[in-house]
Structures are given as structure tokens and as C-alpha cells.
Image (tube, rainbow, N blue to C red):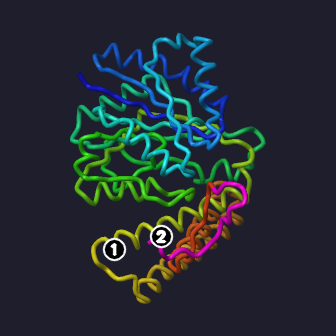
Amino acid sequence: MTTICVAVLTYRRPAGLTHLLTDLVPQLDSAARAGWRPSVVVVDNDPDGSARDTVERWRSAGTGGGQALDLRYVHESTPGIAAARNRALAESRSSDLLVFIDDDETPSPDWLVTLVKAWKSSDADAVAGPVRPVYTTQTADWIRLGPFHDAPSLPDGARMSHAASGNLLLDRRVVERVGAEFPQIGTRGGEDSYFTHALTDAGAIIRWCEAAVVTETVPTDRATARWVTTRSLGNGLTWAAVLTSREAGRGAPHSLTRRLATTGVGAARVVAGLGTMVDAAARRSHGRLGLGVHRASRGAGIVAGAWDWVYDEYARPGTRRWRRESASR
């Protein structure tokens, strides 16, 4: 019997966590009817352990038939989503599959069964599904139509070099064999790029499942010009950092030549992004404007990443967000 551990990562979102746990009840019921053994582990990354009360209140209320869930709560006090994801890896060692979902996401009907069937019917060692954004009506058109929160656009079953971890199934046996872990990068983002590149570099196969959709409600404070451009810039920083890390793993030195080459890649993307923005103005296209801003910001991040700059996306209060950190490579 296939055993499945669904890991819910949470940080101070009690309402979102409550809704997600309720939504998971029919998901797990469907998995059980398919002959599998599902369970849920909530990994709380709040130093205060605030999600414990939320989980206990949900149990007590019996929301959506709470007794149907094989549910555990664990507290991971080390700051950062990478630490929380590694805790999920540790907590799921006895399961065949680990499936990640976050506390601000909502699974579509039969999401879990769809992911597992995609794994069973293919050569995949991991399966990734789309995370579709849901915006408020106040969101500017260029942000809503831009690629800031979009999932990849891939054919169903496509092989991937890396994947985001907000909607990701992992074969635990493959993870153990490869010895992959999320990097110790504190509260910086991009941990999933490091992790999934490590999997594919070791020969693991990640497949795309177009039908295994989850949606993510984008709050107003994450739908501002400052937030989305910083997010795109952070994507560029991560791209440069992962490139350097992978080359270091193959014995390639982080030379001046490599820094300059990476800088050139980033600068070219900045220029391309600015050109797209000019074209957007001529066409009066909100979507093209969003694409141009994303390209230019991501390119600027690649340039900064080439010279060891990092951005701490999930920094806790009192922590510097920008810094140079060559040791992180």
C-alpha cells in the first residue's frame, strides 16, 4: 500500500491553515478510497508555535469531519522555509511519497489523487503541479497580467530541470538515495531551486502535471509594484546563485570570467526587459508591461547575484534583507 505524507508548511496564517486543513479532508478521503494510506503533518515555522493552537481548535471543532485526518503537528523553530521543508523531509521518512502544499494555497478537486496517479503512471521521481494566482479586484492590470506569480507554461508530462515546491510530490526513496536536502540559507527564498536542481543533477526525473492545480490567493501587500519587482529581482539572484553552486559542485572555480559572463547574461535581460516595456507603451499592453518589468528586474538580480549579493525575502524583523554573502556559495 502506497503511503503518502502531505506536508503543510505554515507561518502565522491561522485562517489559511484552518481552511486548508478543511479542504484536505476530501482529498485524503479520495486517496484512501484509491487504496493508499494518506496522512498530514503540519510544520509550524513560527518561533512561538502559534499553529499548535490553530490545529487543536480545528480538531476540537471537527471542521469538515476532522477525525478523518491522520494529522500530526510539529514545531520547527529554526527560521526559514528551507528549515521547515527539511523538517518535513525528516518527518516523512516512513512514507513512500511526500507532497508539499503551503498554508496560503487551495487544492483543486482530486488534486492529491491526480498528483499520485501522474507519479504512478510515469517514470517520474517527482511531480510538480501549477500554482495559479488569485488576485483581488484592486490589483493593477500590469501586475495581474504579468508573469510575477504565474506557474510555468508546459505540456502535460514535460520533463523539468527544476521546480517550485509549493505543489510538489517527491518519491522519498529517491530523495534518500540522492541524499538531497534543502540548503541552509536561512530565511532567503529560492531553496526549491537548489533542491530540485540537486535532484535532477543526480539523475532524478521531475514531470509536470497540468491537472494537479492549486490556487494561491495573492494578498494586497504582495500585489504592489515594489513587491513584485523585488520578487523578480530575487528570482534573478537565485538563478545566479544556483548556477554558481552547481558549477562549484562540478569543480568549476568562481572566477572573474564567470562573474563577468553571468553579469553579461543579466545585463542582456535588463536591456530586453526595457525594450519590452517600450513596446508595451506603444501597444498600450498591460501584459507586455508586466513582462518587461519582470525581465528587467530579474536581469538586475542576475547581475547582483554574480557579485555575491543576496536578498533575504523572508527576513524576520530586525534582520537586514540585502547583504553580500560569498560564503553562501
Residue 247, numbered label? 1
Looking at the picture, which amino acid does disc 1 mark?
Answer: Glu
Return the residue nearer the eye: 248 or 206: 248
Tag on residue 154? none
Residue 316, image x and y in percent? 67, 54
Residue identified by numbered label 2: 328
- Rendered-image quadrant of the C terminus: bottom left
Q: Quadrant of the N terminus?
A: top left
Does the magenta portion include 326? yes
The crowd level at tag 2 (other Cα within 10 Å; few <14, some 14-19, many 20+) is few
**Is residue 14 positioned above or below 151 on the image?**
above
Distance between mark 2 and mark 1 Cα atoms: 14 Å
Q: Residue at x 53, y 68 (%)?
A: 237
User: Front-most of 59 and 275?
Assistant: 59
Instruction: Provide residue 28's location: percent of width, then percent of height.
Output: 42, 20
- Look at the image and give the residue range highlighted in magenta: 315-329
SS at mark 2 in the image: helix
